[in-house]
């Protein structure tokens, strides 16, 4: 069975052009929806669940199926595991033939290469920042001078709630700060 999937991003758009193209290419069942590229696509999930071995999922353009190359590869791998072909009408991707599978594997290799480059750049950036004395992570809520005040108030038996209210900090931040100070003193 040839199954179609059509998607538009906003309510003022419509799927007429996509549905017409899908029907003219033999789609017997078409799933359609209005969803932005980043939101959860319910009709897409229904279409993927509906596909059976030997079926072909057809889309008008690749960006209708996924927002990123990694998401596209993940979806096509899922279809491949189910023995379902994939075909795009406007771009040369058709996993039902050897040329399409070759192109898909080239896309996959390029996506993996891109992920590795990003990982390398991130690692190099973190090392460079550390060499300049910068540390990653979320900034501390309690600055050193505020920490000393919190320690003095706590040592003076001021109730935790009152310290938090006075310094405008949360209990967990105060407890973390006091524990870190104890560790430093040990």
Image (cartoon, grey):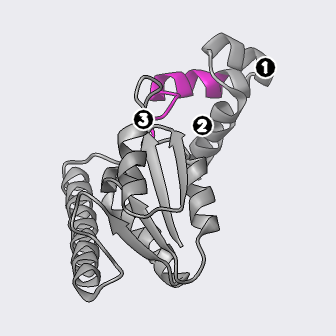
Q: Is residue 133 left or right of residue 145?
A: left
**Which of marks 3 and 1 precedes in the sequence?**
3
x and y percent of residue 89 in the render?
29, 60
Q: Residue at x 44, y 29 (%)?
A: 10
Q: In the rendered image, which residue does mark 3 sit on?
A: 9
User: Is 131 rendered above or below residue 149?
Assistant: below
Residue at the limit of the structure toward the top, as seen here: 166
CA–CA distance between discs 1 and 3?
A: 48 Å
Front of the two marks 2 and 3: 3
The mark found on residue 161 in the picture is 1
Q: Is residue 158 visible?
A: no
Name the foreground residue: 84 vs 111: 84
Name the foreground residue: 133 vs 113: 113
x and y percent of residue 27 in the render?
47, 62
Disc 1 crowd rating (10 Å Cα; few below 14, some 14-19, many 20+) is few
Contact check, label 1 and label 3, Cβ < 8 Å: no
Q: Residue at x 60, y 37 (%)?
A: 177
Is 149 included in the stretch rendered in magenta? yes
CA–CA distance between discs 2 and 3?
A: 46 Å
x and y percent of residue 101 in the render?
29, 82
Q: In the rendered image, which residue does mark 2 sit on?
A: 177
Is 173 included in the stretch rendered in magenta? no
Range of residues picked out in magenta: 137-152
């Amino acid at each position: 069975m040839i199954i179609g999937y059509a998607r538009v991003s906003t309510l003022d758009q419509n799927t007429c052009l996509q549905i017409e193209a899908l029907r003219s290419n033999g789609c017997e069942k078409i799933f359609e929806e209005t969803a932005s590229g980043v939101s959860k696509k319910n009709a897409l999930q229904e279409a993927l669940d509906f596909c059976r071995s030997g079926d072909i999922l057809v889309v008008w353009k690749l960006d209708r199926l996924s927002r990123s190359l990694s998401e596209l590869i993940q979806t096509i791998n899922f279809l491949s595991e189910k023995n379902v072909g994939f075909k795009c009408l406007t771009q040369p991707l058709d996993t039902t033939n050897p040329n399409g599978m070759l192109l898909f594997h080239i896309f996959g290799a390029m996506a993996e290469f891109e992920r590795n480059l990003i990982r390398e750049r991130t690692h190099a950036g973190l090392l460079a920042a550390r060499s300049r004395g910068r540390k990653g992570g979320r900034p501390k809520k309690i600055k050193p001078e505020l920490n000393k005040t919190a320690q003095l108030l706590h040592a003076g038996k001021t109730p935790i709630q009152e310290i938090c209210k006075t310094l405008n900090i949360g209990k967990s931040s105060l407890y973390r700060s006091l524990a870190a100070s104890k560790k430093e003193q040990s």
